Image (tube, helix red, strand yellow):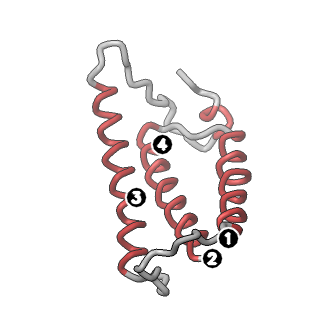
Amino acid sequence: ALAAYKYMIMYGQVESINQVANAYLHITFSEWCWVFMDGIWSISMAFSLPLAHAAKKLSTKRPTASLLGLHTMISACGVLVINFFFLVTALLLLWEQDWFQCRKWENKEVGDTLSIGDNYE
């Protein structure tokens, strides 16, 4: 159950960073991307993680018993930091390319998610 908890916390953190980047670029995921990410991927992982069996040889270190313990917080925040730096580095490298033109959504109204999600170019 703790693995499923950690997965959902990390998934929420990664999605939050991605949504901040999407808000900056005035874009969003399409409807089917949200169905896959929130409906299929996260639920299947949350249900399959508790079904994992123990290893044949257990480690000498005991797992944390606290939801807000040091090990859980370092692993959750570590994924957050890694994802943030990867996203910033990828965007900076992409913007330095001659062939790439940042095509921000020009319309100030970002409430029409159907047209924003279909706006690839």
Note whether 25 is above or below 77 in the view shown: above
**Residue 108: where, in percent of width, then height?**
49, 37
Q: Most extreme residue toward the front, as rendered?
A: 57
Q: Is the residue marked by circle 4 packed among few (<14), some (14-19), or many (20+) residues within 10 Å? A: some
> Cα distance, mark 1 to mark 3?
21 Å
Callout in the foreground (2, 3): 2
Q: Which residue is mark 2?
A: 1
Mark 1 surroundings within 10 Å by alpha-carbon count, few (fewer than 14), some (14 through 19), many (20 or more): few
Residue occupying image coordinates x 47% and y 28%: 106
Closer to the camera in the image, 51 or 97: 51
In the foreground, 49 or 67: 49
Q: Nearer the viewer, residue 112 or 103?
A: 103
Q: Report the amino acid beneath label 2.
A: Ala
The amino acid marked with disc number 1 is: Pro
In primary-sequence order, the first of circles 4 and 1 is 4
* Residue farthest along the top direction in this orientation: 99
Q: Which of label 4 and label 1 is nearer to you? A: 1
Q: Which residue is mark 3?
A: 79
**Residue to which mark 1 is pinned:** 50
The answer to the question of whether label 4 and label 1 lie on touching residues, with beta carbons closer than 8 A, is no
Which residue shows up at 39% across the image and 50% down it?
A: 83
- Residue 5 lies in what quarter of the image? bottom right
Q: Position of residue 86 (x, y in %)?
A: 34, 43
Place of residue 112 in the rendered image (x, y in percent of width and height, measured from the top left): 64, 39
- Labels 1 and 2 touching (C-beta < 8 A): yes
Q: Is residue 108 above or below residue 97?
A: below
Residue on which the image places disc 4: 22
Q: Residue at (47%, 86%) from the top-left corner? A: 66
Residue at (73, 51) in percent of width and height = 40
Q: Residues within 10 Å of mark 2 (few under 14, many from 20)?
A: few
- The answer to whether marks 2 and 3 mark residues whose Cβ atoms lie closer than 8 Å is no
